[in-house]
Each structure stands twice: as C-alpha cells, then as structure tokens.
Image (tube, helix red, strand yellow):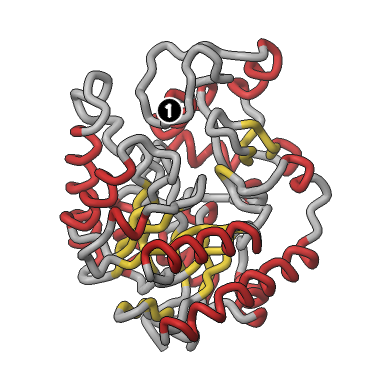
Amino acid sequence: MYGGYQMLKPLKIGNLEAKLPIVQGGMGVGVSRSSLAGAVAKEGGIGVISAAQIGYDEPDWDTNQLEPHMRALDKHIKRAKEISDGGIIGVNIMAVTNHYEEYVKQCMKSGADMIITGAGLPMELPQAAAGSDIKLVPIVSSKKAANIILKRWDKKHQIAPDAVVIEGPLAGGHLGFKPKELVDIDICAYDDEIKKIMEVVKPYEEKYEKHIPIIVGGGISDKEKMQHYLDLGADGVQIATAFVTTEECDADIRYKEAYINAKEEDIIIVQSPVGLPGRAINNAFMKKVKAEGRIAPKHCHRCMEACNPAETLYCITEGLVNAVKGNVDDALLFCGADAWKADRIKTVKEVIEEFTK
C-alpha cells in the first residue's frame, strides 16, 4: 500500500518512478500550475504544469510575449517541486507555441523532470532539449502521428521518446482528431488504435534497449475506466478533468462551478483558433461565437505562430484567461467528455483515492 492506496504498479519513465500510474493532464491557461501539479505529485502521481500563457497574471504580460512566461514557468516549477516534497513534475508545452525552444530550455533550467507535448507534432523537441536528461514525452492520437514522430526522432536525432501519451477522443481541450471522428465515438474501435500505436512503439524499444511506457488519456473519469486501459497494456493513465473540481486546482472557483453545474448535453465539440477541434462547455461565449461567426481579438498576445488575428474566430488566449479568472460568460471552458459528472469540490487526495482504493 502507498498512503492507503491499492497496490498498483508504479509508473517508471527512465530513472523516474511515480508510486502511482497516474499522470495529471496539463490544462491551460493557468488551470494546472504549481498548486495542482504539486498536490498530485505529493500524492504519488506525476503533476503537470501547463506552460500555455503561464504568466498571464504577471504585470508585463500584455507588453512582453516571452519574459513574463519564463519567470512564471520558473516560479511554478520550483514551487510545485517544493509542494510535492520531491515528487515528479512535468510541463506540458503545446507544439504550436511561439518561442517553443525557449520554453523547453526554461523547463530544463528550472528543474522540471519531463516535457509533455501535444497540439501539433513536436518534431524538433529532441534538438531543443539536447544535453539534458529531461524526459521527452509526445502526445499522439493516431498510429499515423506516432509513426511520423518516432521515425523523425530516430532518423534525425537518434533518440526515442521516454514515454508516449495516447490521447483519445473523449479528452478535453484540443483534440488530435477530425471533427467527423468526434461524432458517435466508438471507444472499442479506439482501443484497436491504441494497440496499433503500441505496436509502432515496440521496434524503438528494441532499437534503443529501453522500455517506452504508454500512458492513455481521454475520458478517464473513474477507477473502472483506468483499469480498462491498464488491462489493455498501458503503463499508466492521464487524468485531467477530474482534477479541475479540486481545492488545489489553480483556476477560479467559478470555473470549477461551471463543471459542477454543466449537464451532459452542455458539452460540445468546438473549433479552436489553433486549427484543431476541441471539447468545451457550451456557455454564453460559445453561443456568441456561433451566432456572430467571429469575435475579433481585443489584443494579440502572439501566443501561436499560425494565428492570424485579422482572421481568427476568436482569441483563444482571451477566452482561456477569462476562464481561469472566473469570467465564465466570456470564456472558453475546455473540459473532458465527463465533466458533467462532477458534483462537488474535492481535494486531490480524495480524487486519487477514488481512482485507487
């Protein structure tokens, strides 16, 4: 037993070992910073800070697109480490982020244990992290994406990932699927895709003589779903939505209450300015986007390389910052498919006990 939890196999990623096979998914903007990540790591999981616009509450955030985020990243990595009492802290950096390499190097400098990257293909992550033993973990949703990343890392950088996160169609936030693939989701069929991704990874385990753990995420809202993926062969699971409605979550209480007040039919697929579909609560903001077709940004934060403020549907940074600050009627409220199941505010310890006891 670990802290009263049932005997689950620890999650080993290289020389790191988490007592529990639970990775807390990174949630931005500001939803998973040091408070949540530190609390999860303290309980034996892997805590993950979202790097997305992490310095949104720094005084020079509106005038400086890099330094506020580097300061905040440094502060929150160190604070999470302190809270976790020696636990494992990762950072999630979107591949589409402007100044991606600078974020990677700041994570290395500040003492993060791993970098987890999705929302795009992190082709040059190994180069950005060269010379460090920080663990590199891509997020994929398909066999095709896994093939592309692993082949590129092998051929160009002579490296294999330290772990792979497979994010399924029931996840929150940005999704690596076409919108039509998110209608009438067949989870059994996606189990087959998970197995195919596992097969893609195997030859690289053999070549680099190391185990590459598979971590499955997306819609894991209870113990039974977690066990399903462990039985399927996953080494661990990624859980995000369940940690939003916790005392330790870094978001405003009104964001958490939006989950508690949501009904199943309120959770919809939306189009994100990132160019990917996403899952969110159909609140006043999303209804306004649908009715008006576009909400022009008030200010460009230059957060993504591919964003054109003159054409974008809405400013994703403004929407997500409003969310974390609790301005929920003007916010993009990302969530997982089962967010509507939240019924009260819990502690991180309580949530982990529900998955492990």
Q: Of residues 289 and 63, which is closer to you in this image?
A: 63
Q: Residue at x 39, y 38 (%)?
A: 97
Q: Residue at x 68, y 74 (%)?
A: 195
The amino acid pointed to by label 1 is Thr
* Residue 257: image location, x then y, percent: 52, 39
Q: Residue at x 19, y 24 (%)?
A: 59
Question: Which residue position is annotated with label 1?
Answer: 317
- Mark 1 element type: helix
Q: Of residues 212 and 330, which is closer to you in this image?
A: 212
Instruction: Sort mark 1 into few (<14), some (14-19) or many (20+) by Cα contacts within 10 Å.
Output: many
Q: Of residues 161 and 187, which is closer to you in this image?
A: 161
Q: Is residue 10 left or right of residue 61?
A: right
* Residue 172: image location, x then y, percent: 58, 47
Q: Is residue 6 left or right of residue 66?
A: right
* Residue 166: image location, x then y, percent: 57, 63
On the question of residue 83 being in view, the answer is no
